[in-house]
């Protein structure tokens, strides 16, 4: 075994640079908690010499305490591999010590992450996701590139069922793992794909802007509460009320609402663009042998290694604008604890149709058999249209809540008709887009008039099926069906009970008789 090899069989610390990582992490978290309040106080009270002195002393004390904490955390953090019991052992804790033993067969995913600080220090962060755990049980913040890749390779091999790794993994098997790690860059690449900056820009401009608006509103609410607790906000609110008193007619109110809506859309686009670039900058996909290697992220770079059997639910989405641009997004839901399914959901935006086909080929090798297709009952259209009447009800009720607002029946009626006619057409198209296909290998759900989504589950990966039926739907013989997997659920609304019953019985039979490993 060469001097660069490490079998991780003995307790060891992280790279010494982990002290700097611990320091910046603690310093940032404490400053984030009190920094905004401190800035607001300085703006309110002014910055004189005595206040400046206290600020400098406070920052200095925080830095010293963070440094001490980082040093203690480094020396108290040790990890190793127990090959005899096939476990990864982690010991950590400053004020209290904890020891975590993770069996190899409990490991779901091992991935590398690099924040800006870790890239500056040239170290890697290794995290392990485990079955049945909501939190990351193993999070090593600073390893050299060689150690991180080697440890990841060992753990990814060890977690696999029917693995060739045995109790005598030390020695020759460690040498084989080391050789495989060193030659990983030389392995044959079947195909690769890189998402360019221009593609990310297209995705940001054509994605759901309302998510960006929602993020902005949450952030604004938090900042407003902080400001309100420290300064008198009544003056601002009185000025705002005085401004609104000048607009009493329904037309004027509608103009204000239209301007506000356009402003929110613009802000939503900016926030959505920022989110897309931060999460998916430099997104690359590389297919090597039996696995995918994924890398993405601007401020924090994340690297995944993915095997097909880990994917429980595969989703494909696009909208008419993105489809015309030849762009699709896919979601890969990996097996995980039901407490936190989002933890191992990997989203890949900006993919060409050819890459979507390659992903399907990578994930699914079986051939499709005859397919039976189901559609929802017309009651779904009635239910969705009833919910779409809520804005009309708010409009007609608005004079009871807004003083001095004119109750103009003609204008209210025109607005209601102009809203309801296209809404009825839209809801009809949405319901028509729903379909559920079941064949010998797959369950495939499609939906969406604007955002078109396809969800795919392999039958042998199903964990269960549940149905529910509202009391008023019993006479119509319709019910909701939900297919459960370890990576999330696939639900289909208001399907005919008698029509789907035979297919559900077949699915139960197929799941019970399969001998394929789903994890």
Image (cartoon, helix red, strand yellow):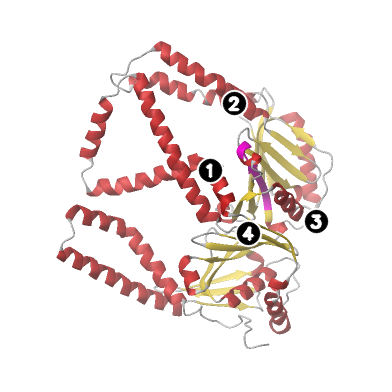
| Magenta-drawn segment | 312-321
Say which of marks 4 and 1 sits in front: 1
| Residue 205: assigned label | 1
Q: Which disc number belongs to residue 284?
A: 4
Q: Which mark is residue 515?
A: 3
Membership of 334 in magenta stretch: no
Asked whether disc 4 touches disc 1, contact meaning CB atoms under 8 Å apart, the reply is no
Whether residue 207 is visible, yes or no, is: no
Residue 268: percent from the left, percent from the top? 46, 42
Total marks placed: 4
- Nearest the viewer among 341 and 210 is 210
Determine whether the residue tagged by mark 1 lies in a helix, strand or loop.
helix
The disc, 1 or 3, on the residue closer to the chain's N-terminal end is: 1
Q: Position of residue 195 (x, y in %)?
A: 61, 54
Please tell me how crowded label 3 is: few (under 14), some (14-19), or many (20+) other residues with Cα within 10 Å. few
State the SS at label 2. Answer: helix
């Amino acid at each position: 075994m060469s001097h660069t090899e490490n079998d991780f069989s003995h307790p060891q610390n992280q790279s010494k640079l982990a002290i700097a990582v611990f320091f910046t992490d603690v310093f940032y978290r404490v400053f984030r908690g009190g920094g905004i309040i401190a800035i607001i106080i300085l703006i309110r009270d002014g910055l004189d010499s005595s206040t400046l002195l206290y600020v400098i002393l406070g920052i200095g004390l925080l830095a010293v305490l963070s440094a001490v904490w980082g040093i203690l955390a480094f020396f108290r953090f040790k990890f190793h591999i127990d090959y005899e019991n096939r476990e990864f052992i982690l010991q950590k804790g400053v004020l209290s010590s904890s020891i975590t033993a993770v069996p190899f067969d409990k490991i779901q995913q091992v991935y590398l992450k690099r924040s800006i600080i870790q890239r500056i220090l040239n170290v890697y962060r290794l995290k392990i996701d485990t079955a049945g755990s909501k939190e990351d049980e193993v999070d090593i913040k600073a390893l050299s590139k060689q150690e991180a890749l080697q440890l990841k390779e060992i753990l990814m091999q060890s977690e696999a069922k029917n693995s060739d790794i045995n109790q005598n993994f030390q020695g020759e098997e460690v040498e084989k793992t080391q050789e495989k790690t060193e030659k990983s860059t030389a392995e044959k690449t079947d195909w690769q794909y890189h998402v360019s900056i221009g593609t990310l820009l297209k995705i940001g401009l054509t994605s759901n802007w309302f998510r960006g608006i929602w993020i902005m509103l949450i952030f604004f609410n938090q900042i407003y509460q902080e400001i309100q607790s420290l300064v008198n906000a009544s003056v601002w609110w009185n000025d705002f009320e005085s401004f609104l008193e000048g607009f009493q007619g329904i037309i004027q109110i509608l103009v204000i609402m239209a301007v506000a809506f356009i402003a929110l859309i613009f802000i939503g686009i900016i926030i959505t663009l920022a989110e897309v670039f931060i999460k998916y900058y430099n997104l690359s996909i590389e297919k090597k042998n039996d696995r995918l290697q994924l890398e993405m992220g601007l401020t924090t770079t994340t690297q995944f290694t993915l095997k097909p059997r880990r994917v429980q639910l595969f989703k494909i989405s696009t909208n008419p604008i993105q489809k015309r641009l030849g762009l699709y997004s896919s979601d890969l839901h990996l097996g995980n604890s039901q407490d936190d399914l989002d933890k191992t959901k990997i989203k890949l935006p900006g993919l060409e149709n050819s890459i979507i086909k390659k992903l399907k080929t990578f994930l699914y090798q079986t051939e499709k058999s005859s397919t039976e297709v189901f559609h929802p009952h017309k009651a779904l259209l009635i239910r969705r249209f009833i919910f779409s009447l809520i804005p009309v009800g708010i409009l007609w009720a608005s004079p009871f809540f807004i003083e001095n607002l004119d109750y103009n029946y003609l204008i209210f009626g025109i607005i209601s008709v102009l809203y309801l006619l296209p809404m009825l057409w839209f809801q009809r198209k949405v319901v028509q887009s729903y379909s559920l296909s079941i064949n010998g290998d797959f369950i495939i759900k499609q939906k969406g008039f604007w955002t078109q989504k396809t969800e795919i589950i392999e039958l042998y990966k199903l964990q269960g099926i549940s149905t529910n039926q509202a009391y008023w739907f019993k006479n119509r013989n319709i019910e909701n069906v939900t297919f459960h997997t370890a990576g999330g659920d696939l639900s289909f609304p208001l399907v005919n009970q008698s029509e789907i019953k035979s297919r559900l019985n077949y699915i139960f039979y197929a799941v019970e008789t399969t001998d394929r490993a789903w994890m």
